Image (spheres, helix red, strand yellow):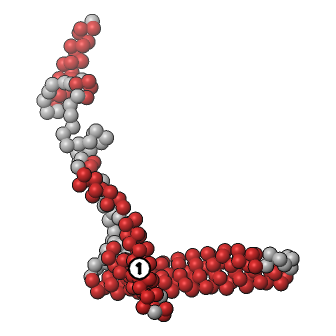
Amino acid sequence: MDGTSGSGSHSSRAGLGGLFGGSGPEYSSSELAGVPLTGMSPLSPYLNVDPRYLVQDSEEFILPTGANKTRGRFELAFFTIGGCCMTGATFGALNGLRLGITETRDMAWSKPRNVQILNMVTRQGALWANTLGSLALLYSVFGVVIEKTRGAEDDLNTIGAGTLTGMLYKSTGGLRSAMRGGLLGLTLTGLYAVYNNWEHLKTRSSRQSL
């Protein structure tokens, strides 16, 4: 009885196979599991496309003609100047608070002492905000001019802008003072350039050692 039903079902499948284009060899799920998918990732066995081609390695933007993906020095100048002014004001206010409390420590907590502390806070905040803002303005202007003159954006522009900023800012004190200011600007921007390219320098040194 079982053999008759098995042969009947087999003949019916064969008949349906012949009806829809002919019968072919039948494979079990275990046999199909060992068949490799050529050029396809196992994560998407139902696609006829390699999913690796669907992954974009780089970001895509819709930019105006001639525009760059990264902001240049002119765009970063506003952020630099504003950030330096806010940083200077914050540092100056804290320093003024420290100086005001120190200078009025012999006075009792009263309205005159509070006024003196407040005056010291505002004075120091404005002084440091003006100083750092002026340095940021000079650095940004020199950076933009050097970038437009050279036609390239790299760390040489940063070092050159920092050196010229230090020289011009301290130029009122004479030639020696200007040279010290330029040396200080060169040192600070040189350290920043090294920090900014530290990973690249490490990779390059490791390749040379190999």
On the image, which quarter does residue 28 sit in? top left
Identified at 41% across, 69% down, the residue is: 191
Apparent side of residue 152 relative to residue 131 in the rendered image (left or right): left
The location of residue 80, given as percent across then percent down, is 48, 78
- Looking at this view, name the residue that lies furthest to the front: 176
The location of residue 4, given as percent across then percent down, is 23, 9
On the image, which quarter does residue 176 sit in? bottom left
The location of residue 132, given as percent across then percent down, is 53, 81
Identified at 28% across, 56% down, the residue is: 205
Of 62 and 120, which appears nearest the observer? Answer: 120
Residue located beneath label 1 in the image: 183
Identified at 33% across, 84% down, the residue is: 146
Say if 130 sits above or below 54 in the image: below
- Looking at this view, name the residue that lies furthest to the top: 1
Apparent side of residue 187 relative to residue 88 in the rendered image (left or right): left
Q: Is residue 68 visible?
A: no
Q: Secondary structure at mark 1?
A: helix
Identified at 79% across, 84% down, the residue is: 115
Q: Is residue 180 visible?
A: yes
Of 139 and 10, which appears nearest the observer? Answer: 139
Say if 150 sits above or below 34 in the image: below
Apparent side of residue 40 relative to residue 142 in the rendered image (left or right): left
Q: Residues within 10 Å of mark 1 (few under 14, many from 20)?
A: some
Q: Amino acid at mark 1?
A: Leu
Apparent side of residue 184 relative to residue 28 in the rendered image (left or right): right
